[in-house]
Image (tube, rainbow, N blue to C red):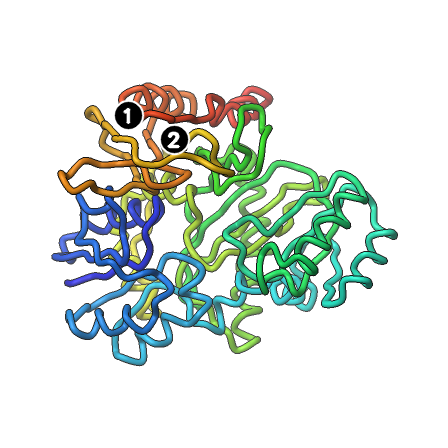
């Protein structure tokens, strides 16, 4: 089959590498892809938000299946347009993608259906939001309602920082129209867990859990990023917690979306916090997480493309979904200065490392792979346990080089500490 994957980052590279192994897949096109993805798929220079040209390309090239990976095209309704042309898709339609597209919608959904989450209020007027902050316990969380490249969430340690966050979003429009409405919510404490899941709206199958590392520097210091590395499974996600999540969060969310006439089909991401009162939802995403995908999919023993077909057809209950019992670690290598400002154009050299997922790179005229972004790539390794996976990943990082590279040296340290506490 001819398959099209929309997107151009490390997550898309991980998806492409996995579906490429399926005997059902003969050709893969990446729109737009990147210089690293070009070694595993045919890259087409059409942006992920250029819906009209994506649909045109799919029709003209007889695409038989589409995977829409990033949030923007999902929220904009690309799946609806492709399905209208008879092209099966993995990914939610526009009505369902609102679960990530609007934080106010997702919080209201959880409140309505009794799904555990932090207490919150929503505001469209800045003065009311500022007045409400005077009544809040600090620290407090301020969120832009809409999509903001994963950066629209501010944990304010002081009242003044919270007010500044509201002004930045609502008055200065640092996140554009995404900040016209803000959600102010209670600050929860506890270990964070990411759980991706396959769902067709009738059946929900959780994938292996993972632990993300958002801060730029060792010891969880520095600025928030799109993610500096991940490990899987997450040791805080015990069998008991998994059972509670299935009963109290995962299935109730799927059923709530059905009741709202917004049946969700695709990858539903649960960002969770394990509080003293049990697991609670921090956020939903309507797609595979990045870089969680880069540790979760390498542990999938089943045919990913076949699972995606079942999800699109509404027959997930018939799919074979098996994950390995071992562990994986992904270390993100970024450009020095990320996430603020950084230089591009340095040559990337990879010496015999198989699982490298390229996020920000381009091919030069003479075929060399050059850095072209903040997060450049992720190096993933599997191991019998988390400790072995971490050790192997860092050994492989030494064999991937480019000028101006930086990465955290403590990916997975928190997971190891949790295991030692047991």
Label 2, label 1: how many angstroms apart (C-alpha)?
A: 9 Å
Q: Residue furthest right?
A: 135
**Picture residue at 75% right of the left edge, 43% below the top:** 161
Q: Quadrant of the N terminus?
A: bottom left
Crowd around label 2: few <14 · some 14–19 · many ≥20 (10 Å):
many
Q: Which mark is residue 400?
A: 1
Q: Are marks 2 and 1 in contact (CB under 8 Å)?
A: yes
Picture quadrant where residue 93 is located = bottom left
Query: In x, y percent, where is residue 34?
Result: 27, 47
- 82 or 274, which is in the foreground? 82
Q: Residue furthest bottom?
A: 84
Query: In x, y percent, where is residue 123?
Result: 74, 64
Q: Which mark is residue 333?
A: 2
In the displayed structure, 71 sits above or below 228; it is below
Q: Is residue 248 visible?
A: no
In the displayed structure, 306 sits above or below 261; it is above
Please indicate whether residue 356 sits to the left or right of residue 289 in the image.
left
């Amino acid at each position: 089959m001819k398959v099209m994957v929309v997107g151009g980052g490390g997550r898309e590279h991980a998806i492409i590498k996995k579906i490429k192994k399926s005997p059902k897949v003969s050709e893969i096109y990446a729109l737009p892809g990147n210089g690293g993805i070009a070694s595993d798929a045919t890259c087409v220079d059409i942006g992920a938000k250029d819906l009209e040209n994506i649909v045109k390309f799919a029709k003209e090239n007889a695409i038989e299946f589409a995977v829409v990976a990033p949030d923007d095209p999902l929220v904009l309704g690309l799946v609806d347009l492709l399905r209208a042309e008879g092209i099966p898709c993995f990914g939610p339609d526009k009505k369902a993608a609102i679960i990530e597209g609007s934080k106010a919608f997702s919080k209201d959904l959880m409140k309505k259906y009794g799904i555990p989450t932090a207490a919150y209020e929503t505001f469209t007027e800045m003065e009311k939001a500022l007045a409400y902050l005077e009544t809040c316990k600090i620290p407090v969380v301020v969120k832009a309602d809409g999509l903001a490249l994963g950066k629209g969430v501010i944990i304010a340690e002081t009242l003044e920082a919270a007010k500044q966050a509201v002004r930045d979003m609502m008055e200065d429009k640092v996140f554009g129209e995404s900040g016209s409405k803000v959600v102010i919510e209670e600050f929860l404490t506890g270990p964070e867990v990411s759980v991706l899941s396959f769902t067709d709206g009738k059946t929900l199958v959780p994938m292996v859990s993972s632990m993300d590392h958002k801060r730029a520097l060792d010891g969880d210091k520095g600025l928030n990023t799109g993610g500096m590395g991940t490990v899987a499974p997450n040791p805080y996600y015990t069998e008991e917690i998994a059972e509670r999540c299935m009963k109290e969060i995962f299935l109730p969310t799927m059923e709530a979306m059905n009741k709202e006439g917004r049946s969700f089909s695709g990858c539903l991401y649960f960002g969770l916090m394990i509080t003293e009162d049990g697991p609670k939802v921090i956020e939903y995403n309507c797609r595979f997480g990045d870089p969680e995908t880069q540790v979760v999919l390498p542990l999938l023993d089943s045919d990913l493309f076949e699972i995606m077909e079942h999800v699109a057809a509404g027959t997930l209950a018939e799919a074979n979904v098996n994950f390995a019992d071992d562990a994986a670690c992904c270390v993100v290598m970024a450009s020095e200065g990320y996430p603020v400002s950084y230089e591009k154009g340095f040559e990337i050299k990879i010496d015999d490392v198989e699982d490298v997922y390229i996020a920000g790179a381009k091919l030069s005229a003479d075929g060399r792979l050059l850095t072209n972004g903040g997060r450049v790539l992720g190096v993933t390794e599997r191991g019998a346990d988390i400790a072995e996976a971490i050790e192997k990943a860092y050994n492989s990082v030494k064999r991937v080089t480019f000028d101006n590279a930086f990465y955290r040296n403590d990916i997975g340290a928190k997971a190891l500490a949790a295991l030692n506490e047991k």
